[in-house]
Image (tube, helix red, strand yellow):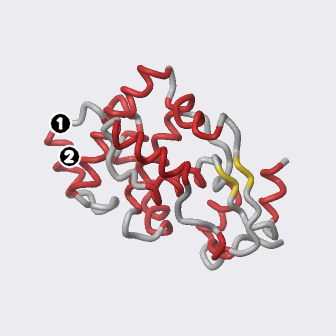
Amino acid sequence: MNRCEWCLGDPLYIKYHDKEWGVAVHSDRKLFEFLILEGAQAGLSWITVLKKRPAYRKAFDNFDFNKIAKYKESKIQSLLNNPGIIRNKLKIRGTVKNARAFINIRKEFGTFNKYIWQFTDGKTIHNAWSKLKHIPAKTDISDQISKDLKKRGFTFVGSTICYAYMQAIGMVNDHTIDCYRYKQLKT
């Protein structure tokens, strides 16, 4: 069974590749989780974030954006001392800021799902890459999403992070065409 080459070599990576990467996500809580985790990845590898994901869920109230938006300074300080997560002050404070901006989008659009999926007309873009090296780091759509999220007060949402987010939540199917998941997600 062929898989995308980026996931080979680590069982956690393989499980993520096989079960989550590229699968369309429409739950606001899950969309928020991936947005925060992709931002946490900035400057690091995705496997580092995946290994810390259970600790993130525990530390950040299972990514309940309503709770996170109300975090006080004492909670932020406890997060900065939590060895289970990436203890970057800007990323942790950015998570709180992003929760507040996320709630504002929900007020405007009804759901974050409705907002984010409008950029692809509610459909997954199925690319047809033959090699990992052909997959772009960003696209015109990720540029648009990044610009709009920043305008709305989000942080750690550069175009490259937004494209990784699009891949994670299934807005794009970037499995290589020889990967068994490519055809499964296309149908």
Q: Amino acid at mark 2?
A: Ile
Where's residue 143, x and y in %?
48, 51
* Amino acid at the residue labelled 1: Lys
**Horizontal placement of 45 versus 129: left or right?**
left
Classify mark 1: helix, strand or loop.
loop
Q: Quadrant of residue 87?
A: bottom left
Location of residue 80 in the rendering, given as x and y in whole percent from the top left corner:
21, 55
Q: Is residue 128 left or right of residue 5?
A: right
Q: Farthest front residue?
A: 140
Disc 2: which residue: 76
- Comparing 151 with 42, the one in front is 151
Residue appearing at x 64%, y 56% in the figure: 21
The residue at the point 17 percent across, 36 percent down is 72
- Residue 105 in percent (x, y) is at 42, 28
Q: Is 141 above or below relative to 16?
A: above
Height in image: 57 above or below 152? below
The foreground one among 156 and 52 is 156
Count residues near mark 1 (Cα–Cα under 10 Å), then give few for <14, some for 14-19, many for 20+. Answer: few
In the image, residue 181 sits, relative to residue 133, either above or below, namely: above
Task: Report which residue position mark 1 lands on.
Answer: 72
Specify the quadrant of the image occupied by residue 158. bottom left
Q: Mark 2: which secondary structure?
A: helix
Residue shown at 84% from the left, 57% from the top: 183
Nearest the viewer among 119 and 184 is 119
